[in-house]
Image: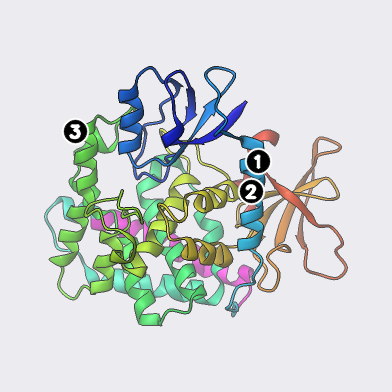
Amino acid sequence: MIKRIAVQHLEVGMFITDLNNDWIPHNNNRRRGVLRSDEVIAKIRQMGVKEVYIDTAKGRDSSFAVPLSEVDAKNESLLQNAGSLPPVTRNRVSREEEMIVAHRIHNEAQGLVSNVLEGVKLGKAIDLSSVNDLSGELLNSVLRNHNALTCLGRIREKDNYLLEHSVNLSVLMSIFGKSIQLPVDVMHQTVVGALLHDIGKILTPDEVLHKPGKLSDDEFRVMKQHVVHSRDLLRNTDGIGELTILTAGQHHERMDGSGYPDGLKGEEISPYGRMVAISDVYDAITSDRVYHKGMTPSQGLKKLLEWSGSHLDRNLVHHFIRCIGLYPIGSLVLLESGRLGVVVETNEDDQRLPTVRIMYHTRFRQFVKVETLDLSRPSVQDRIVRAVDPEDYRIDVRDFLT
Protein backbone atom coordinates (compact mmCIF):
# COMPACT_ATOMS: atom_id res chain seq x y z
CA MET A 1 0.00 0.00 0.00
CA ILE A 2 1.22 3.50 -0.85
CA LYS A 3 1.27 5.85 2.16
CA ARG A 4 2.54 9.33 2.96
CA ILE A 5 4.81 9.88 5.95
CA ALA A 6 6.59 12.89 7.47
CA VAL A 7 10.37 12.74 7.10
CA GLN A 8 10.91 12.79 10.88
CA HIS A 9 9.25 9.38 11.01
CA LEU A 10 11.33 7.76 8.26
CA GLU A 11 13.17 4.60 9.26
CA VAL A 12 15.78 2.37 7.69
CA GLY A 13 14.03 -0.41 5.80
CA MET A 14 11.21 1.71 4.38
CA PHE A 15 10.72 1.72 0.61
CA ILE A 16 10.42 5.22 -0.88
CA THR A 17 8.28 5.40 -4.00
CA ASP A 18 8.11 9.22 -4.32
CA LEU A 19 10.19 11.91 -2.62
CA ASN A 20 7.27 14.32 -3.16
CA ASN A 21 9.73 17.06 -4.07
CA ASP A 22 8.70 18.32 -7.49
CA TRP A 23 8.46 21.76 -5.89
CA ILE A 24 12.27 21.78 -6.03
CA PRO A 25 13.20 23.69 -9.21
CA HIS A 26 14.92 21.57 -11.85
CA ASN A 27 14.53 18.59 -9.58
CA ASN A 28 15.37 15.30 -11.23
CA ASN A 29 16.22 13.49 -8.01
CA ARG A 30 13.34 11.09 -7.72
CA ARG A 31 14.95 8.41 -5.62
CA ARG A 32 13.05 5.14 -5.32
CA GLY A 33 14.07 2.19 -3.24
CA VAL A 34 14.78 0.91 0.24
CA LEU A 35 16.28 3.28 2.80
CA ARG A 36 19.47 1.52 3.88
CA SER A 37 21.08 4.05 6.22
CA ASP A 38 20.37 6.96 8.54
CA GLU A 39 22.75 9.03 6.40
CA VAL A 40 20.36 8.79 3.44
CA ILE A 41 17.45 9.85 5.65
CA ALA A 42 19.49 12.83 6.88
CA LYS A 43 20.20 13.86 3.28
CA ILE A 44 16.48 13.76 2.45
CA ARG A 45 15.78 16.07 5.39
CA GLN A 46 18.52 18.46 4.25
CA MET A 47 16.76 18.80 0.88
CA GLY A 48 13.86 20.54 2.63
CA VAL A 49 11.48 17.64 1.97
CA LYS A 50 8.70 17.49 4.56
CA GLU A 51 6.77 14.36 3.54
CA VAL A 52 7.47 11.41 1.25
CA TYR A 53 5.50 8.46 -0.06
CA ILE A 54 6.41 4.87 0.86
CA ASP A 55 5.28 1.46 -0.37
CA THR A 56 4.51 -0.76 2.62
CA ALA A 57 4.34 -3.83 0.38
CA LYS A 58 8.05 -3.44 -0.36
CA GLY A 59 9.35 -2.10 2.95
CA ARG A 60 8.59 -1.27 6.56
CA ASP A 61 5.26 0.25 7.58
CA SER A 62 4.60 2.84 10.30
CA SER A 63 1.69 3.90 12.45
CA PHE A 64 2.54 7.48 11.44
CA ALA A 65 2.00 6.76 7.72
CA VAL A 66 -1.28 7.87 6.07
CA PRO A 67 -2.79 5.78 3.23
CA LEU A 68 -2.76 7.43 -0.20
CA SER A 69 -6.56 7.16 -0.41
CA GLU A 70 -6.88 9.39 2.67
CA VAL A 71 -4.34 11.86 1.29
CA ASP A 72 -6.22 12.03 -2.02
CA ALA A 73 -9.55 12.54 -0.24
CA LYS A 74 -8.11 15.38 1.83
CA ASN A 75 -6.48 17.04 -1.18
CA GLU A 76 -9.74 16.78 -3.14
CA SER A 77 -11.62 18.39 -0.25
CA LEU A 78 -9.05 21.19 -0.07
CA LEU A 79 -9.33 21.71 -3.81
CA GLN A 80 -13.12 21.90 -3.73
CA ASN A 81 -12.96 24.43 -0.88
CA ALA A 82 -10.29 26.51 -2.63
CA GLY A 83 -12.35 26.55 -5.82
CA SER A 84 -15.66 27.39 -4.20
CA LEU A 85 -15.44 31.12 -4.89
CA PRO A 86 -16.01 32.58 -8.38
CA PRO A 87 -13.41 34.78 -10.13
CA VAL A 88 -13.61 38.51 -9.44
CA THR A 89 -13.18 39.76 -13.01
CA ARG A 90 -15.13 39.54 -16.25
CA ASN A 91 -14.02 38.70 -19.78
CA ARG A 92 -14.67 41.41 -22.33
CA VAL A 93 -14.86 39.34 -25.52
CA SER A 94 -15.58 35.72 -26.43
CA ARG A 95 -12.84 33.10 -26.38
CA GLU A 96 -13.37 32.44 -30.09
CA GLU A 97 -12.88 36.11 -30.93
CA GLU A 98 -9.77 36.45 -28.77
CA MET A 99 -8.23 33.24 -30.10
CA ILE A 100 -7.43 34.93 -33.42
CA VAL A 101 -5.29 37.57 -31.70
CA ALA A 102 -3.92 35.13 -29.12
CA HIS A 103 -2.39 32.86 -31.78
CA ARG A 104 -0.32 35.75 -33.12
CA ILE A 105 0.74 36.97 -29.68
CA HIS A 106 1.70 33.48 -28.54
CA ASN A 107 3.87 32.85 -31.59
CA GLU A 108 5.48 36.30 -31.40
CA ALA A 109 6.19 35.83 -27.68
CA GLN A 110 8.05 32.58 -28.28
CA GLY A 111 10.00 34.22 -31.10
CA LEU A 112 10.86 37.19 -28.90
CA VAL A 113 12.14 35.02 -26.03
CA SER A 114 14.21 33.03 -28.52
CA ASN A 115 15.72 36.24 -29.94
CA VAL A 116 16.48 37.59 -26.46
CA LEU A 117 18.22 34.36 -25.48
CA GLU A 118 20.28 34.35 -28.67
CA GLY A 119 21.17 38.01 -28.21
CA VAL A 120 22.30 37.47 -24.61
CA LYS A 121 24.43 34.53 -25.76
CA LEU A 122 26.15 36.89 -28.23
CA GLY A 123 26.64 39.56 -25.57
CA LYS A 124 23.96 41.91 -26.88
CA ALA A 125 21.77 44.11 -24.67
CA ILE A 126 18.15 43.16 -24.16
CA ASP A 127 15.81 45.08 -26.47
CA LEU A 128 13.47 46.21 -23.69
CA SER A 129 11.25 48.18 -26.06
CA SER A 130 10.21 45.04 -27.94
CA VAL A 131 9.75 43.13 -24.69
CA ASN A 132 7.54 45.88 -23.26
CA ASP A 133 5.42 46.08 -26.39
CA LEU A 134 4.86 42.32 -26.55
CA SER A 135 4.19 42.08 -22.81
CA GLY A 136 1.58 44.81 -23.14
CA GLU A 137 -0.16 42.93 -25.94
CA LEU A 138 -0.09 39.68 -23.96
CA LEU A 139 -1.51 41.38 -20.88
CA ASN A 140 -4.28 43.04 -22.88
CA SER A 141 -5.22 39.68 -24.39
CA VAL A 142 -5.56 38.19 -20.91
CA LEU A 143 -7.64 41.15 -19.76
CA ARG A 144 -9.98 40.68 -22.73
CA ASN A 145 -10.34 36.89 -22.31
CA HIS A 146 -7.62 34.81 -20.64
CA ASN A 147 -9.06 31.50 -21.89
CA ALA A 148 -7.55 31.95 -25.37
CA LEU A 149 -3.89 32.19 -24.36
CA THR A 150 -4.44 29.58 -21.65
CA CYS A 151 -5.64 27.09 -24.25
CA LEU A 152 -2.57 27.75 -26.38
CA GLY A 153 -0.39 27.34 -23.30
CA ARG A 154 -1.59 23.75 -22.92
CA ILE A 155 -0.55 22.88 -26.50
CA ARG A 156 3.16 22.37 -26.03
CA GLU A 157 6.10 20.16 -26.92
CA LYS A 158 8.58 18.91 -24.34
CA ASP A 159 11.53 19.70 -26.61
CA ASN A 160 10.56 23.39 -26.64
CA TYR A 161 10.07 23.66 -22.88
CA LEU A 162 12.23 26.72 -22.18
CA LEU A 163 10.43 29.00 -24.62
CA GLU A 164 6.93 27.72 -23.92
CA HIS A 165 7.44 27.81 -20.16
CA SER A 166 8.52 31.46 -20.27
CA VAL A 167 5.49 32.47 -22.32
CA ASN A 168 3.07 30.38 -20.27
CA LEU A 169 4.45 31.75 -17.02
CA SER A 170 3.79 35.29 -18.23
CA VAL A 171 0.21 34.27 -19.09
CA LEU A 172 -0.32 32.71 -15.66
CA MET A 173 1.07 35.80 -13.95
CA SER A 174 -1.26 37.98 -16.02
CA ILE A 175 -4.25 35.87 -14.95
CA PHE A 176 -3.06 35.89 -11.34
CA GLY A 177 -2.61 39.67 -11.31
CA LYS A 178 -5.96 40.19 -13.01
CA SER A 179 -7.68 38.03 -10.39
CA ILE A 180 -6.28 39.90 -7.38
CA GLN A 181 -6.75 43.21 -9.20
CA LEU A 182 -3.18 44.46 -9.28
CA PRO A 183 -2.68 47.85 -10.95
CA VAL A 184 -2.01 47.48 -14.67
CA ASP A 185 1.50 48.99 -14.44
CA VAL A 186 2.40 46.50 -11.70
CA MET A 187 0.98 43.63 -13.72
CA HIS A 188 3.02 44.74 -16.72
CA GLN A 189 6.28 44.64 -14.76
CA THR A 190 5.54 41.16 -13.40
CA VAL A 191 4.67 39.93 -16.89
CA VAL A 192 8.02 41.19 -18.20
CA GLY A 193 9.74 39.50 -15.25
CA ALA A 194 7.95 36.23 -15.99
CA LEU A 195 8.75 36.40 -19.69
CA LEU A 196 12.47 36.96 -18.96
CA HIS A 197 12.82 34.96 -15.74
CA ASP A 198 14.94 32.22 -17.30
CA ILE A 199 17.21 34.26 -19.60
CA GLY A 200 20.15 33.39 -17.33
CA LYS A 201 19.89 29.79 -18.49
CA ILE A 202 21.60 30.80 -21.73
CA LEU A 203 24.75 31.16 -19.62
CA THR A 204 24.33 27.69 -18.10
CA PRO A 205 26.58 25.07 -19.74
CA ASP A 206 24.62 22.89 -22.18
CA GLU A 207 25.86 19.70 -20.56
CA VAL A 208 24.12 20.78 -17.35
CA LEU A 209 21.07 22.50 -18.82
CA HIS A 210 20.16 19.64 -21.14
CA LYS A 211 21.38 16.68 -19.10
CA PRO A 212 18.61 14.03 -19.17
CA GLY A 213 19.94 12.14 -16.16
CA LYS A 214 20.33 13.08 -12.52
CA LEU A 215 22.36 16.22 -11.81
CA SER A 216 25.28 15.84 -9.42
CA ASP A 217 25.46 18.19 -6.42
CA ASP A 218 28.04 20.31 -8.25
CA GLU A 219 25.91 20.39 -11.42
CA PHE A 220 22.85 21.41 -9.41
CA ARG A 221 24.82 24.29 -7.89
CA VAL A 222 25.73 25.40 -11.41
CA MET A 223 22.10 25.13 -12.49
CA LYS A 224 20.92 27.28 -9.60
CA GLN A 225 23.18 30.10 -10.76
CA HIS A 226 20.84 30.80 -13.67
CA VAL A 227 18.67 32.91 -11.37
CA VAL A 228 21.64 35.08 -10.42
CA HIS A 229 22.53 35.42 -14.09
CA SER A 230 18.94 36.42 -14.96
CA ARG A 231 18.84 38.98 -12.17
CA ASP A 232 22.21 40.49 -13.15
CA LEU A 233 21.25 40.69 -16.81
CA LEU A 234 18.03 42.51 -15.94
CA ARG A 235 19.75 44.88 -13.53
CA ASN A 236 22.14 45.87 -16.32
CA THR A 237 19.25 46.62 -18.69
CA ASP A 238 18.40 50.31 -18.95
CA GLY A 239 14.79 51.14 -18.03
CA ILE A 240 13.99 47.85 -16.34
CA GLY A 241 11.47 48.00 -13.48
CA GLU A 242 12.33 46.93 -9.95
CA LEU A 243 9.28 44.63 -9.79
CA THR A 244 10.49 42.93 -12.96
CA ILE A 245 13.79 42.13 -11.24
CA LEU A 246 12.00 40.89 -8.11
CA THR A 247 9.71 38.64 -10.15
CA ALA A 248 12.56 37.07 -12.10
CA GLY A 249 14.96 36.93 -9.16
CA GLN A 250 12.62 35.33 -6.62
CA HIS A 251 10.77 32.70 -8.66
CA HIS A 252 12.73 29.90 -6.98
CA GLU A 253 12.49 31.17 -3.39
CA ARG A 254 10.37 29.11 -0.97
CA MET A 255 8.42 30.07 2.15
CA ASP A 256 10.50 27.83 4.44
CA GLY A 257 13.82 29.18 3.15
CA SER A 258 14.65 26.06 1.13
CA GLY A 259 14.70 27.93 -2.18
CA TYR A 260 17.42 29.92 -3.94
CA PRO A 261 19.42 32.00 -4.70
CA ASP A 262 19.04 33.88 -1.40
CA GLY A 263 17.22 31.39 0.82
CA LEU A 264 14.55 33.98 1.65
CA LYS A 265 11.75 33.04 4.05
CA GLY A 266 8.09 34.05 4.38
CA GLU A 267 7.58 37.80 4.20
CA GLU A 268 11.18 38.28 3.08
CA ILE A 269 9.90 37.17 -0.33
CA SER A 270 7.95 39.88 -2.16
CA PRO A 271 4.28 39.20 -3.01
CA TYR A 272 5.32 39.01 -6.68
CA GLY A 273 8.04 36.48 -5.86
CA ARG A 274 5.51 34.34 -4.01
CA MET A 275 3.04 34.62 -6.89
CA VAL A 276 5.56 33.67 -9.55
CA ALA A 277 6.82 30.77 -7.42
CA ILE A 278 3.32 29.26 -7.40
CA SER A 279 2.82 29.87 -11.12
CA ASP A 280 6.26 28.50 -11.95
CA VAL A 281 5.81 25.29 -9.93
CA TYR A 282 2.35 24.69 -11.39
CA ASP A 283 3.48 25.13 -14.98
CA ALA A 284 6.57 22.98 -14.41
CA ILE A 285 4.82 20.02 -12.80
CA THR A 286 2.01 19.97 -15.38
CA SER A 287 4.41 20.04 -18.37
CA ASP A 288 6.07 17.13 -20.13
CA ARG A 289 9.86 17.38 -20.12
CA VAL A 290 12.72 15.10 -21.07
CA TYR A 291 12.98 13.74 -17.52
CA HIS A 292 9.47 14.47 -16.27
CA LYS A 293 5.98 13.34 -17.27
CA GLY A 294 3.60 16.18 -16.51
CA MET A 295 0.74 15.81 -14.06
CA THR A 296 -2.82 16.62 -15.07
CA PRO A 297 -3.94 20.18 -14.21
CA SER A 298 -6.11 18.95 -11.32
CA GLN A 299 -3.28 16.84 -9.92
CA GLY A 300 -1.05 19.90 -10.15
CA LEU A 301 -3.49 22.02 -8.15
CA LYS A 302 -3.70 19.36 -5.45
CA LYS A 303 0.08 19.31 -5.20
CA LEU A 304 0.14 23.10 -4.79
CA LEU A 305 -2.26 22.69 -1.87
CA GLU A 306 -0.17 19.86 -0.40
CA TRP A 307 2.97 22.00 -0.54
CA SER A 308 1.32 25.24 0.62
CA GLY A 309 2.31 26.65 3.96
CA SER A 310 5.75 25.05 4.00
CA HIS A 311 7.02 25.81 0.49
CA LEU A 312 4.35 27.99 -1.12
CA ASP A 313 2.19 30.83 0.22
CA ARG A 314 -1.05 29.15 1.30
CA ASN A 315 -3.30 32.18 0.84
CA LEU A 316 -1.92 32.92 -2.62
CA VAL A 317 -2.28 29.26 -3.65
CA HIS A 318 -6.01 29.56 -2.91
CA HIS A 319 -6.15 32.75 -4.98
CA PHE A 320 -4.33 30.99 -7.81
CA ILE A 321 -6.85 28.15 -7.86
CA ARG A 322 -9.67 30.66 -7.79
CA CYS A 323 -8.34 32.43 -10.88
CA ILE A 324 -7.45 29.45 -13.09
CA GLY A 325 -10.45 27.37 -12.09
CA LEU A 326 -11.37 24.26 -10.17
CA TYR A 327 -10.98 22.42 -13.48
CA PRO A 328 -8.24 24.37 -15.32
CA ILE A 329 -8.25 24.62 -19.08
CA GLY A 330 -6.85 21.42 -20.53
CA SER A 331 -8.40 19.23 -17.83
CA LEU A 332 -10.10 16.05 -19.02
CA VAL A 333 -13.29 15.55 -17.02
CA LEU A 334 -15.80 12.72 -16.67
CA LEU A 335 -19.46 13.76 -16.87
CA GLU A 336 -22.45 12.08 -15.23
CA SER A 337 -23.53 10.92 -18.70
CA GLY A 338 -20.35 8.87 -19.00
CA ARG A 339 -18.89 11.18 -21.60
CA LEU A 340 -15.44 12.76 -21.42
CA GLY A 341 -14.72 16.37 -22.24
CA VAL A 342 -11.72 18.71 -22.28
CA VAL A 343 -12.22 22.00 -20.45
CA VAL A 344 -11.77 24.83 -22.96
CA GLU A 345 -13.23 27.75 -21.00
CA THR A 346 -13.70 28.46 -17.32
CA ASN A 347 -16.97 29.80 -15.89
CA GLU A 348 -17.00 33.28 -14.37
CA ASP A 349 -19.89 32.52 -12.02
CA ASP A 350 -19.49 28.87 -11.03
CA GLN A 351 -16.20 27.01 -11.33
CA ARG A 352 -18.03 23.68 -11.35
CA LEU A 353 -19.66 24.54 -14.70
CA PRO A 354 -17.00 25.24 -17.34
CA THR A 355 -17.33 24.84 -21.09
CA VAL A 356 -16.08 21.45 -22.25
CA ARG A 357 -15.41 19.82 -25.61
CA ILE A 358 -16.94 16.32 -25.66
CA MET A 359 -15.16 13.61 -27.67
CA TYR A 360 -15.41 10.20 -25.94
CA HIS A 361 -18.01 7.97 -24.24
CA THR A 362 -16.70 5.75 -21.46
CA ARG A 363 -19.67 3.38 -21.45
CA PHE A 364 -19.29 2.57 -25.14
CA ARG A 365 -15.50 2.91 -24.98
CA GLN A 366 -15.35 4.85 -28.21
CA PHE A 367 -14.88 8.32 -29.58
CA VAL A 368 -18.03 10.29 -30.39
CA LYS A 369 -18.76 13.32 -32.53
CA VAL A 370 -16.99 16.36 -31.08
CA GLU A 371 -19.40 18.71 -29.34
CA THR A 372 -18.80 21.88 -27.33
CA LEU A 373 -20.97 22.00 -24.22
CA ASP A 374 -21.47 24.96 -21.87
CA LEU A 375 -22.39 23.24 -18.62
CA SER A 376 -23.81 26.47 -17.18
CA ARG A 377 -26.69 26.67 -19.65
CA PRO A 378 -30.10 25.78 -18.12
CA SER A 379 -30.81 23.32 -20.92
CA VAL A 380 -27.67 21.32 -20.09
CA GLN A 381 -28.21 18.91 -17.20
CA ASP A 382 -24.89 17.05 -17.39
CA ARG A 383 -22.42 17.69 -14.57
CA ILE A 384 -18.76 16.93 -13.86
CA VAL A 385 -18.09 13.88 -11.70
CA ARG A 386 -14.32 14.27 -11.48
CA ALA A 387 -11.17 15.04 -13.42
CA VAL A 388 -9.48 12.02 -15.02
CA ASP A 389 -6.09 11.19 -16.51
CA PRO A 390 -6.03 11.37 -20.33
CA GLU A 391 -3.53 8.51 -20.46
CA ASP A 392 -6.15 6.16 -19.03
CA TYR A 393 -8.14 6.66 -22.25
CA ARG A 394 -5.24 7.34 -24.64
CA ILE A 395 -6.56 10.81 -25.34
CA ASP A 396 -4.32 13.73 -26.30
CA VAL A 397 -6.18 16.77 -24.97
CA ARG A 398 -4.12 19.06 -27.21
CA ASP A 399 -6.15 17.83 -30.18
CA PHE A 400 -9.33 19.38 -28.75
CA LEU A 401 -8.22 22.75 -27.35
CA THR A 402 -8.58 24.99 -30.41
Instruction: Count residues near mark 1 (Cα–Cα under 10 Å), then give few for <14, some for 14-19, many for 20+.
Output: few
Answer yes or no: do the residues labelled 3 and 1 have beta carbons within 8 Å?
A: no
Quadrant showing the C terminus = bottom right
Quadrant showing the N terminus = top right
Answer yes or no: do the residues labelled 1 and 2 have beta carbons within 8 Å?
A: yes
Say which label, 2 or 3, has the lower sequence index: 2
Q: Which residue is mark 3?
A: 218
Give the amino acid type for the residue marked by disc 2 in the picture.
Answer: Lys
Give the amino acid type for the residue marked by disc 1 in the picture.
Answer: Glu
Q: Secondary structure at mark 1?
A: helix
Say which label, 3 or 1, has the lower sequence index: 1
Q: Secondary structure at mark 3?
A: helix
Determine the residue positioned at 56% across, 58% down: 151
On screen, residue 272 above or below 288: below
Report whether residue 147 is seen. Answer: no
Q: Nearer the viewer, residue 175 or 134?
A: 175
Q: Which residue is mark 1?
A: 70
Report whether residue 333 is seen. Answer: yes
Identify the colour scheme used: rainbow
Residue 200: x and y in percent read 22, 52
Picture quadrant of residue 295: top right
Q: Which residue is mark 2?
A: 74
Q: Nearer the viewer, residue 217 or 282?
A: 217
Question: In the image, 66: left or right of 271?
Answer: right
